[in-house]
Amino acid sequence: MRKNLTLHKNKHYKSTGTDILTDERGFSSSIDAILFLILVSISAVILMPSLVADEQYRSASYTSAQDMDTYLLNTIMSSTVDDFGYTLKPTELAGIDVNLSEHSILEDAEKTIFEKEQQHRTFSDLVAEGLVLSLYKEENGTRKALNPMTKMQGIETEKSIEAHLERTIGQRYDYRFEAHWQPVTGYIVQSEIIAGEEAPVNAVKQKARITLPVTYSIPMDDIYGPFNESTIYSAINSPDPDKELHDMFNKSILIASEGSALIITDIVFPYEYLSSLNGTEFSVDSEQLACLTGPATQNYSNPVIQSVLGCMNYTVNDLYGLSITIDPEEQSINLDLVDTVNTLIIDENTRLISGHIKDRHSDDIDRTIAIICNATDNSTRYELASSELDEIYRTANTGGADIVLMIW
């Protein structure tokens, strides 16, 4: 019995060992796995240079695009446009009819009278001028141009920039040019010039800043005027320091706002030019008028005067709602009217801008006043006030316009 059991165990052991030795499936799988790893390694060796080269190509392409973008922006900033022109559109705004006489040799009377030609101007000059002439108000998603009769300047500038970029880069890159200006940071009045399609997020960007043909005429010292160590000390020791300090900041904001208001008013209501039209000196000379009207219509209203009166009516009544009567049939510009309207628009712009700046800086001013009231040193109080006044000044005087050029 024990012998048989031993034989049985030996037989089982012998049988199992024989199966393992004779089964070749394990060796075959191992060989397949080793061969697969060898092939993967060979593929990696073959493909690695290609992958590295592809990344190098992408890097080189990006660097090349950066260099091209820098070059393009430099050309826009410095290249000269030899012949640039645009036509003012006062006839649409004023509702006047510029008629040709029966024997006129002109084909386009509006272009003859109101065309503006400029020679040898840089693109940056044209962009700066276009931003000034293209100001608009945006309220509740609606845009309203501050000076609609100059709209063609921005359109022609965009065309010139597009033509320059097409000549320079052809079909090698796509592009997007943007120029933005806000006379007052965050204010509803702004302007822009845009050429090209919307850029992707990975586009190469170059930025620059340009000055504009306008001047902020309020000195920084005037904005600091309400504040000095003496006035701060008096405010702190008054029965209501918080109110006194708020009043001082409001005075500074009003002064800063007037500087911005003067810029915007001069753009939409050019006082000096309008004042020059009260006599017989017109932009249209007698030869142009003769071509337009002929000798038999000597009482024909001067189209420049008509257009100016129409633009004044738009600015005064439509844009600012001042309800001032302007007779479109006048043959000259009344100086008293010009003075009155100019003052009213400056005051209205100052009021609107100061309200915006107060809202924008109210939280910061509240915090600054709280710290000033808790400070024990008067010099520290003045430094705190100065820091906030600097921020107010930068809001009221942005100092220039931003340009962005993107290619991809």
Image (cartoon, grey):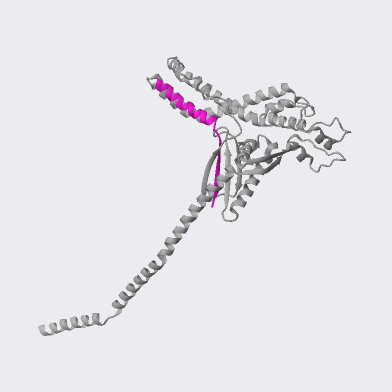
66 vs 140, nearest the viewer: 66
Residue 268 lies in what quarter of the image?
Answer: top right
Residue 206's place in the image compared with 295, above or below, is below
Q: Quadrant of residue 130?
A: top right
Q: Residue furthest left?
A: 2
- The magenta span reads 379-408
Q: Is residue 117 above or below residue 376?
A: below
Q: In which quadrant of the rendered view does residue 187 lie?
A: top right
Q: Main secondary structure of the magenta part?
A: helix
Instruction: Count numbered badges in the picture.
Output: 0
Tell me which residue sits at (55%, 23%) in the image. Answer: 255
Q: How far from the left and from the top, in percent, is residue 165?
A: 60, 49
Q: Residue furthest right?
A: 296
Question: Can residue 17 be seen in this snapshot?
Answer: yes
- Where residue 172 sits: x, y (%)? 57, 56
**Left of 230 or right of it: where is 13?**
left
Q: Is residue 73 above or below residue 229?
A: below
* Closer-to-camera residue (384/127): 127
- 32 vs 93, left or right, is left
Q: Is residue 47 above or below residue 314?
A: below
Residue 201 seen by the camera: no
Instruction: Based on the picture, tell me whether residue 314 belongs to the magenta stretch.
Output: no
Q: Quadrant of the N terminus?
A: bottom left
Specify whether residue 406 is painted magenta.
yes
Indicate left or right for 340 with 401 as reference: right
Frontmost residue, 326 versus 14? 326
> What residue sits 49% from the left and 53% below the top?
62
Q: Position of residue 365 (x, y in %)?
A: 47, 26
Residue 388 placement (x, y as % from top left): 47, 27
